[in-house]
Image (cartoon, helix red, strand yellow):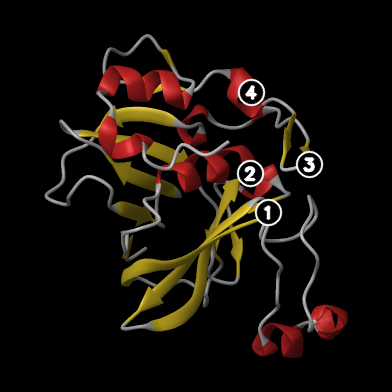
Amino acid sequence: MHIRTLFLAISLTGLLAAAGCTTTNSSSTVMAPISAYAATSDDGVDLPRVPITQVDDKYRRQIINYQTDEAPGTIIVDTRERLLYLVLEDGKALRYGIGVGRDGFRWSGDAYIGRRAEWPTWYPPQAMIKRQPELKEYAGGMEPGVMNPLGARALYLYKNGNDTMFRIHGNPDWTSIGQAVSSGCIRMINQDIIDLYARVDPDKRTKVIVLEG
């Protein structure tokens, strides 16, 4: 499913429908239904259901009131709160739960999305292989699939024309959402990264701001 031009072209009402969201008891919050995390087939790969009711509601995809001077389309990552915001029009944002880097691997600053990939191949960095020699077998790349650490989609973060080696990506372990367990990358539930990926304009260098945790 490709809805890449959807984000900037539709009204808030249309956006809510596209997000598969339903209103909660709060008039300012529109939360994705359980069905948004159902099992699905994506490009021939079977994604399992995520038991989203076992995840804190804070981390479920939802549209919220959000005030910022950043332009719509900007991605803001709050590593302290384990939340990622896609800035929308009219003082709103689409918020997702994330997993972040563990102590010693967190980072902050500005970047932009320099590359996007569906079902990417994972190449563990040499520094990671040095820390975990068992990963050496994947030095030439781990094939895409549900157990691939990059999950269903990856957004590659660049700065000054260079790959930072950090990504916003899916992952097979939904229990890592809200946790600080990665090597610096931003993890998302696969169903959520598919949703976010579709909203990132492939023809623009989407700005990404990672707040200091």
In the rendered image, which residue does mark 4 sit on?
53
Marks 1 and 2, how far apart at CA: 6 Å
Residue 198 left/right relative to 131: left
Identify the amino acid type marked 4.
Answer: Thr
Q: Is residue 126 left or right of residue 16?
A: right
User: What residue does disc 1 label?
Assistant: 151
Q: Classify mark 3: helix, strand or loop.
A: loop
Residue 32, visible in the rendered structure: yes
* Mark pair 2, 3: CA separation: 15 Å
Q: Earlier in the sequence, mark 2 or mark 3?
A: 3
Q: Which residue is mark 2?
A: 190
For the residues labelled 1 and 3, the Cα–Cα distance comes to 14 Å
Residue at the image position 78 percent from the left and 50 percent from the top: 146
The label nearer to you, 2 versus 4, is: 2
- Distance, label 3 to label 4, CA atoms, is 26 Å
Q: Which residue is mark 3?
A: 44
Give the mark nearest the N terminus, 4 or 1.
4
Q: Nearer the viewer, residue 204 or 177?
A: 204
Q: Earlier in the sequence, mark 1 or mark 2?
A: 1
- Name the amino acid, label 2: Asn
